[in-house]
Amino acid sequence: MIRFKNGRILPMTNGCEITEGEVWTNGSKISFVGKPTEEQLKNTKFDRVIDLDGDVIMPSFKNAHTHSAMTFLRSYADDLPLQNWLYTKVFPMEAKLTGDHIYWLSKLAILEYLSSGVTACFDMYFNPEDYVHANTECGFRTVLCGSVSGGAENIERLDSCMKQFNGIHPLISYRLGFHAEYTASRELLEGMGELVKKYKAPVSTHNSETAKEVRECVEKYGKTPTELFDSLGILDYGGSSFHCVHLSENDMDIFAKRGMYAVTCPGSNSKLASGIAPICKLLEKGIPLAIGTDGPASNNCLDMFREMFLVTALQKLSLNDAAACPAGEVLKAATVGGAHAMGLDDCDVIAEGKQADLIVIDLKQPNMQPLNSIANNIVYSGSKTNIRLTMCAGSILYENHCFSVGEDPKRIYARANEIISSMRD
């Protein structure tokens, strides 16, 4: 058991309300939250006691959309619009990837997640077997998102992955998904609808990321991507849509009706000049929100602090309203919203019986002082330098700038550089 004492607790069970007390973990779960009695302390044996010294303990961030292994393209294909970026830079390099590449490149991403307070991500990429190995070896939690594209023959592969990866490991789960409308044939989309009926399960995909994507879908099908998916039964059990920049009013009504999560990726959308998602309108309609970084090729970092600031700042700017999208909504989206969008309902808050996926925020740094509002500090002035500790499933994987992932970070860095060097040859 691990005892966190003398801390401020931000459990996210009641907005951004902070209490004082202790958090105990036992194995992979949280076993106690609150102020213990002398009797409880006397009768409990701890493997380790961590004095928080007034720092904040809170649920970890959940990266609700990413492509982790794209670390190899960080700062390789910059300053290009999305379609050029994808077809002239990204897709040709991705064709050279091997399973071993993805294994090492994913480990590099995991280090960055942990240093940013992230303990789980919703990852859409190739070679799931190699990605699973990287995650389980590091002790990192991940939800694999189906990434099929092309023709209907790929539906069988998605069906197979659902059976293969769900239940394979406590840290791994798999959800139905496809890349996007513009990379899928009509037959594949119809097959997705049938698979949804079979599993009665949610589906996730890139959706309305650019104006061009929406315009061409309307020209082709007479419907927006969201309307098309809904007409084919793909959204019957909800799911998550990534980006959601160019949604119509009807699209948002469909989201609300189907219980869809909108996953915003403001860093990537800004860098690729895709636009600003209508976050405030989504929230007004009761549509739940989560936050993702997107991949490190289009962001280029995997930093949830930067994403949180951009979510609120871009809304204020686009609406010319400094009161738009308050910090509390953003912090909820980065923690609770992300967990729920990924199906990780036992990883959402700090409460007894929940998974011990938590972080400690160092308040004893100048950017976190004074303590007028700790939640606002985290969103508006916080950075990954404030992450003192990151725990996933009860295991401390990052503490005081040191990693415990079963691998020397220097070796991971070296392999990543070797991989990109060989691909350029």
Image (cartoon, rainbow, N blue to C red):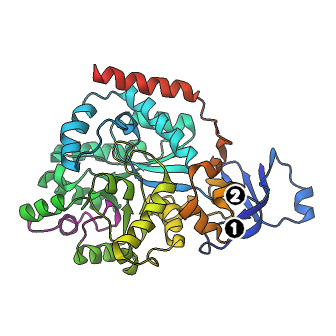
Q: Nearer the viewer, residue 382 or 283?
A: 382
Can you identify the residue that label 1 sits on? 371
For label 2, the SS is: loop
Please provide percent x and percent y for residue 334.
50, 61
Give the number of the disc on residue 229. Answer: none
Say whether residue 246 is magenta.
yes
Is residue 398 in sight in this rendering?
Answer: yes
Quarter of the image with the C terminus is top left
Q: Nearer the viewer, residue 406 or 30?
A: 406
Q: Residue at the far bottom: name it.
A: 284
* Image-based side of 84 in relation to 330, left or right: left
Q: Residues within 10 Å of mark 2 (few under 14, many from 20)?
A: many
- Residue 274 quadrant: bottom left
Say whether residue 231 is magenta.
yes
Q: Nearer the viewer, residue 171 or 417?
A: 417
For label 1, the SS is: loop
Give the number of the disc on residue 363. Answer: 2
| Residue visible at 54% across and 50% down in the picture | 118
* Image-based side of 398 in relation to 2, left or right: left
| Callout 2 amino acid | Leu
Which residues are drawn in magenta? 222-247
| Residue visible at 56% across and 44% down in the picture | 114
Please provide percent x and percent y for residue 398.
63, 42
| Residue visible at 27% across and 45% down in the picture | 79
Is residue 117 in sight in this rendering?
Answer: no
Q: CA distance from mark 2 to mark 1?
A: 8 Å
Q: Nearer the viewer, residue 220 or 171?
A: 220
| Callout 1 amino acid | Leu
| Residue visible at 32% across and 65% down in the picture | 276
Q: Residues within 10 Å of mark 1 (few under 14, many from 20)?
A: few
Please provide percent x and percent y for residue 180.
23, 53
- Residue 36 quadrant: bottom right
